[in-house]
Every structure is written in C-alpha cells, then in structure tokens.
Amino acid sequence: MAKVPVQFTLNGEEKAEFVESGSTLLKALREKIGDMSVKGGCHQGTCGSCSVIIDGELRLSCIALAETCSGAAIETTAGLARGGVLHPLQRAFHEGFAAQCGFCTPGMLMAAKALLDRNPSPSREDVVDAIGGNICRCTGHEPIIQAILSAARANSVNAA
Amino acid sequence: MALTLQTFPTADAASAALAADGASRYLGGGTLVVRQANEGDLSFSTYVRATDPALSAITVDDGQATLGASVTIGRIIADGRLAHIAEAAKSVGGPAVRNMATVGGNLYAPAPYGDLAVALLALDAMVEINGGPVPLSAFLADRYGTYAHSVLKSVSFALPAAGGLRFLKVSRVKPKGVSVVTIAALLEETDGTISSARVAYGCMADRPIRAQAVEAELAGKPRTADGIRDALTMATDGTSPITDAIASAWYRSQVLPVHLGRLLLA
C-alpha cells in the first residue's frame, strides 16, 4: 500500500506523518497522530462528529483525504483547552448540560468555534444553521444551542 | 482494495487520467466519492484530482456568472455578487459540507442530492466539458454516460434579478434534512401576467429535470391562484419521482403540486 508524506499544523504544532494514499484525515488524526478527540460517526459526511477546522473553515475529516490537507492548519477539540483552562465553549457546554453521551460534542464544539470565530455575536438562527450538519441523539440540540449562545454572550461581556 | 490519489495540475491532464483508467473517480470536494469509498464501493481504486486555479475561479461580468467546477458551495454563499442564488446554495447540507462540496460535484450528485443543480437548471445554465459548452439539461441527461469520465470545468449562467429566482427545498428534517422535493422557478412577468417561465424539479427523477408542461401552461397566465390552476394539474407530467428512505415516489408526486403552487404564488 503506497505511503505518502503529509505535513500540517495541528492545534499549533507541526506534524509530519506517512499515511496511506487515499486515506482520510480522520484516520490520520486518530490512528497516526493519536488525536482521539476527533470522533468517527457515520463516515458519510452526515453526522458531523468528525468536524474539524481546516484553514479556518469547518470541514469533515471523515471525507477529507489526508493528502489534500498537506500544509494546512488544522484545529481539533484537543486544542481548545489551554493550560488546564477550558475554552469558553467547553465551559458553557459543561455548565449548560449540553453533553450527554458526549459523542457528538467534539464536532459540535468545532462547529460552534468556527461560527464564533467569524461571528462573535450570533443570533439563535445563526447557531441553528452552524450546527445544522451535526447530529445529537441525546440532548435534543436545545441545550447545545443555549450553551453556544451563552458562550457568545460571555465573550461579548469579557470583550466589553 | 487500496485507494490511491493522483493529483494533476490541469483539468485536461486529470481528464486524460480518468479516461485512461476505468477504475478511477474524480475527486472534487469529496462529499460524494469519499463517502462511497467509506461505504465499501469497490468499483474504483484511484482518486483523480486537478489543482488548476481556474477550476476555483468565480467570474461575474455584465450579469453573467461563471463558476469554476471546484468552487465550493460555501464560497458561493460568501460572495455577495452571487447573492441571488445564495438561498439555493444554503439549502445544501450543513456548514462543513458546504465548505467542501463543489458546484461541479453538485451537478453530478444523484437524487435526493443536487439542490443547487435544480436552481442552475432553472437558470438555463451551460457547462464547459469535453472542450466545449453544453446545456446543463443535456449534461444532466448524460452525466453518468458520456461525461462520467470527464472533468467538468465550469458552469455559466445569467444572474437573475433580485427575487427573480424562486427556490424551495422541502424537507422533513429541519434545518438540514434531505430533500423530499426541490423546486426552482424563474418567471418573467409583464403587468401581472407570466410572459415566460422556467421551472425545474429535484427528486422528481434520477436527475434535476425541467417541468416543460408547467412552463408552457404558465405562459400568458396571470400569477394568481386561478391563473396557475391548470399548470398545477400537470405538475407531475414527465416526472418519475425517486423512492428513498425520506419519501416514496407516490408521496413526492402528491405533495409536488402543493409546494409548486405555494412557490409560484409567494
């Protein structure tokens, strides 16, 4: 099986690996690099569990080929907390009971981060659209929507 | 079976590679073809892609738009010059899918996917493929035949006036479910009378199709409930709806006239 070199930045750290040609970014992140924060759900681009941010855009690592990400800056949930301090979104999810089984949570967090990075003061409609590609089968989405809005409000208070 | 990715600098080189290897598939955004591989499709072993910057170009000039086939749905939404087709683009998937899925891939997407293609069909778009322009309707009819192993380069269309393109995606799952039926309509009106109409459907066949009987019936009629009544009676003429987990062909044929009426009168 042909192996190809892939280099990218993962949560600010340079990574270089040999991956099987034609293999997915999800596989590279989990099996080569050991970033288990990225979850493989449907592997069809439908559930959003594997969402990561690539060069500032939310994408699905289960249907992105690792080779096509060479040179990119990739962000995953593993990079959200810094120095033992939760990211405001993680804190809002925790405090707002926005996680139950937790399987969708990493993808939801990345979808929310991609939204807040470009729109720090989203409307409820913006939040619903932002997580429209992420499926949660436990909490029913409402606590997640409220947590994202809460994190956005906290950010705007801190920025004021 | 092991998969490999081959990258070419031009669309022509990628096209030649596709033509030479029957076990290859073109990789646009990956939302269709990588999914197929993940599902265990063994009919191909090679991904082929092209990195030609022309494939990612958006040109808007004198009311005419040309989108390179690799332009993503997300870029269409973000480009203010394309605001009049943004609603159709927003109906495609969630943000992550929109950041990956390409306009070229959407034109190859089997029903129930391909919502943007429905809008482009109503806009009477042309595609550039195999060295020349081809009407979108002709391309769609032969996309898995003549054009299955070709690289689609671009799609061009006249930008509609503000509010000119009427678009409706009916879905059972909100906000981002798969289409039960998708309808796009471009109407020209003079003094309240429809002078010409182009109407396109998604999910009412294995590809987006024009509703030619409806278009002919609408011409010359006032855009009122009475004026469109006869057109609605022939809404399903020429259709062959798909059946999938979302809806049966029967259900799609039953709800189509209702939604078409709402769209035309909105």
Image: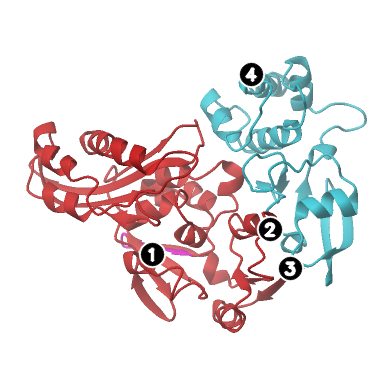
Chain colours: A cyan, B red
Chain of the residue on which disc 3 is drawn: B
Q: What secondary structure is the magenta-colored segment mainly?
A: strand
Rendered residue at 44%/79% (across/down):
B130
Q: Amino acid at mark 2?
A: Gly
| Other residues around mark 2 within 10 Å, as few (<14) / some (14–19) / many (≥20) | few
Distance between the Cα atoms at labels 1 and 2?
Answer: 26 Å
Quarter containing the N terminus of chain B: bottom right
Instruction: Determine contact: label 4, label 2, CB under 8 Å.
Output: no
Whole-percent x, y for residue B224 in the image: 12, 34
Part of the protein shown in magenta: B61-68
Mark closer to the observer (4, 3)? 3
Rendered residue at 65%/33% (across/down):
A116
- In-image side of A85 versus A21 (left or right): right
Indicate which disc residue A146 carries.
4
Looking at the rendered structure, the secondary structure element under dot 4 is helix
Rendered residue at 63%/33% (across/down):
A135
Whether B228 is drawn above or below B48: the answer is: above
Indicate which disc residue B3 carries.
3
Indicate which disc residue B40 carries.
2
| Other residues around mark 4 within 10 Å, as few (<14) / some (14–19) / many (≥20) | some
| Other residues around mark 3 within 10 Å, as few (<14) / some (14–19) / many (≥20) | some
Looking at the rendered structure, the secondary structure element under dot 2 is loop
Q: Earlier in the sequence, mark 1 or mark 3?
A: 3
Whether A137 is drawn above or below B242: the answer is: above
Q: Amino acid at mark 4?
A: Gln
- In-image side of B119 versus B105 (left or right): left
- In this rendering, does residue A13 appear at all? no
Q: Amino acid at mark 3?
A: Leu
Mark closer to the observer (3, 2)? 2
Query: What residue is disc 1 on?
Result: B140
